[in-house]
Amino acid sequence: MFKIPIRPRSLFGKLMLSHLLVVALSFLVIGFYLTYLIENYFFSAREWELTSQAQDAAYLISEDLKENDMEAVKKTAETLAYSMNAKIRVLDEKRVSRYTFDPDANTNGMNNEQDELVGLEEREIDHLFKGNMLTKKVYGPVLQRLLVAAPVIDEAGNPANGEDNHEEPMIIGAVTLSVPLRGVEETIAHISRLIFYSGAVGVVIAVVFAFSLSKTLTSPLQKINRAALDMAAGNFQSKIKEESDDEIGGLIKTFNYSAEQVEKYLEEQKRLEMLRRNLVANVSHELKAPLSSVRGFSELMLDGYIEEADKEKYLQMILDNSVHLSRLVDDLLTLSHLESGQLSLEKKEISVEALVRWSFESVAPRGEAQGVNLNLDVESSLPALQGDRHRLHEVLVNLLENAVQYTAEGGEVSLKVSCRNSQVIMEVKDTGRGIPADELPLIFERFYKVDKSRRRNGQGSGLGLAIARQLVELHGGSIEVESKEGEGSVFRVFLPL
């Protein structure tokens, strides 16, 4: 297999080399082919010209040769040789060379060395004396010559020896004309030089274009390589300027977009990592307080430090803390199932009004116990909804309980349900302390927990809103919040019909 001795390593070098090889080979093939065509053309033209001259010479000599006037034949042949600038030989009917004239050699008379063959082989002479034309190249020690032989025909059928007429014309001799191909060869050599010079100029131009094209192709790739190295070093701010709309430009756009997405992904991972650390801290705190209470009260009761009359109160504290721990564990399990996609919905056609009243009545006793007024406003003739009744109940209860927790005694919590634009809208509004503006973007994060000091008690895991958002999105809906610190909050749930 053919191997290139020097193989460039860079793409720029490979493109340059490939372009130059293609151009050089193309010029080489075209040059050889043009030279071949030109050589054939000039040879064919010279051959046609010499053939015509040979026929004319045979015609002019035929009358004298038929009359056997050899002196006239000699003069005619000599005149034709100089006028046609060609070497001429005259053969008689016995195939013997009678006269030879070569203007280039400035000689005349018989050429004793080639009397028999005169540059022709025996079979070629036989072919000639059968009345056929003959053309061939004669290769000499110095020059090549083009030789054309024409038979001398007695059209009247009267040979010089006085024999009876024949029905067919008689061959009474032959004439050969030969000229050196020096002029043709010089012309071809000159044209070949012109082709070579043109090819050299073409290669130079091709080098310029190949350099420009290779630079255009490799420069963006070098920029992409540098930007990729910057990304590997942690710098995602390096952007590549788009300079074209072709495939290279498309690659740059894709690279810039990928860099932006990776940067966003890493920022998201950092944010989630911070939220996970907050989760660990919050959950640890949530577990530590009730566990400490359960353990402390249990040890006091076992050691006999608590009087019989107070045991029921402390047992109730132990039970409340156990319930809180159970809710925390349930919330964590629910959130884990939601994030892993293991939680499936049991969607059925449900009555929106019945769902809302069930959720409202579940929270109403707690609101009354804490001195919070609860109001329900349900639009009449609400259409049925496809969804999981228990999961949507969980969402509404969570929102209502949060509203009650964040609302002071004497405050108000309302639940309003309506239908607009093929959507059921559930709106939970409270008159509590509201949510600070800097906490609003994080309120639905799955690992975020609102500051306990803003709630009326320390209960809750801080995972309820994250769970609510996940459940709403599983139903194809969305949830949003509006809040102003000191004026309360409004949570809206949008569910498609």
Image: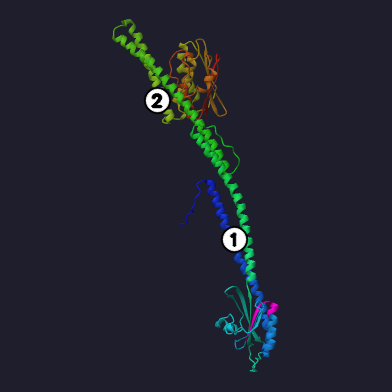
Q: Residue at x 57, y 74 (%)?
A: 141
Q: Is residue 196 above or below residue 294?
A: below
Q: Which quadrant of the figure contains the N terminus?
A: bottom left
Residue nearer the viewer, 224 or 18: 18
Left or right side of 167 for 269: left
Residue 6 numbered tag: none
Q: Residue at x 63, y 58 (%)?
A: 198
Q: Distance between the residues labelled 1 and 2?
A: 79 Å
Which quadrant holds residue 193?
bottom right
Q: Which residue is drawn at 43% across and 23% down?
A: 277
Residue nearer the viewer, 337 or 177: 177
- The verdict on residue 83 being magenta is yes
Left or right side of 75 for 322: left
- Residue for badge 1: 30
Residue nearer the viewer, 19 or 379: 19
**Rendering coords of residue 321 (x, y %):** 38, 15
